[in-house]
Image (cartoon, grey):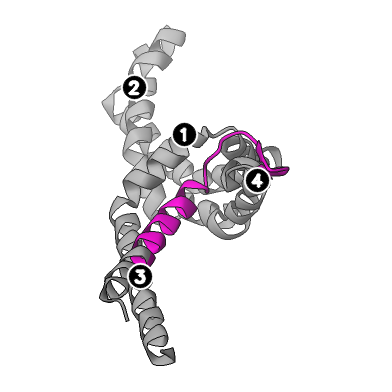
Amino acid sequence: MNWWLVIIIPVTSAFTGYITNRLAVKMLFRPRTPVRVFGITIQGIFPARQPQFAQRIGALVTSELVSFSEIEAKITSEESVKKIMPVAELHIDDFLRNKLKEAFPMIGMLIGEKTIGTLKTIFMNELETIFPVIMKEYVKNLQQDLDLEKMVAAKIAALSTDKLETAIYEGLKKELRQAGFFFGLLGFLIGLVQVGIVYILK
């Protein structure tokens, strides 16, 4: 048996495994536009199926990732209401001290600090009660008016293939490199098996 085969077969198999992996990743996005080779049309998987991917991801987002009931529960929770109250209190205080007096100067002459404090307490208590009700109705209307699935699908369908490819390569650079080495190693091992089979048969 020629000993150069013991070297060249595993090395060639390793190179083939590495290149095949790299080519498979590239073919996810390239070629961007259809290219005919020997009567066969070749195009990157994502560019060719982008509309279908967009529809499926849009459906997945609305069914599995985004729940309007969860959004409603979150923004109407006691914790969320308490977080928004200080902001509301500032606006109510400004309304009672400034805007109300500007709109009705006579009222400004009749109310003092104690009255302002009392009115502010009444408004804050009422606001704390009606805020969850308002937000529930708002989310309900939002769900009816907002076609989230269609919106997500449209965004993905319009997404630049170049940007997506760059984002994936940058985000998975380490993993893609490891995959290339793995397939290269796998090819090398297959090459050794081939050498062993040739040796046994001889």
Please state which of residues 189 and 91 is positioned toward the viewer in this rendering: 189
For disc 1, the neighbor class at 10 Å (few under 14, some 14 to 19, many from 20) is few
For residue 94, the mark is 2
Q: Given the image, on which type of amino acid does mark 2 rest?
A: Asp
First in sequence: mark 3 vs mark 1: 3
**Disc 1 or 4, which lies upstream in sequence?**
4
Label 3 with label 2: CB-CB less than 8 Å: no
Which corner quadrant of the image does residue 138 belong to? top right
Which of pointers 2 and 1 indicates the residue nearer the eye?
A: 1
Q: Residue at x 51, y 56 (%)?
A: 73
Q: Amino acid at mark 4?
A: Arg
In the rendered structure, which disc, 4 or 2, sits on the residue that comes first in sequence?
Answer: 4
Q: What amino acid is at disc 1?
A: Asp
> Looking at the picture, does residue 145 appear above or below residue 112?
below
Residue 138, visible in the rendered structure: no
Q: Crowding near pointer 2: few (<14 within 10 Å), some, many (20+)?
A: few
Q: Which residue is mark 1?
A: 162
Per the rendering, the mark at residue 9 is 3
Kind of residue at disc 3:
Ile
- Is residue 40 shown left or right of residue 74? right
Q: CA distance from mark 3 to mark 1?
A: 37 Å
Q: Earlier in the sequence, mark 3 or mark 4?
A: 3
x and y percentages locating residue 30 in the rendered image: 53, 40
How far separated are the C-alphas under marks 4 and 2? 55 Å
| 76 relative to 187, above or below | above
Give the secondary structure at mark 1. helix
Which residue was labeled with disc 4? 49
Would you place residue 69 above or below residue 162 in this image? below
- The range drawn in magenta is 13-41
x 32%, y 82%: residue? 1
Q: CA distance from mark 3 to mark 2?
A: 82 Å
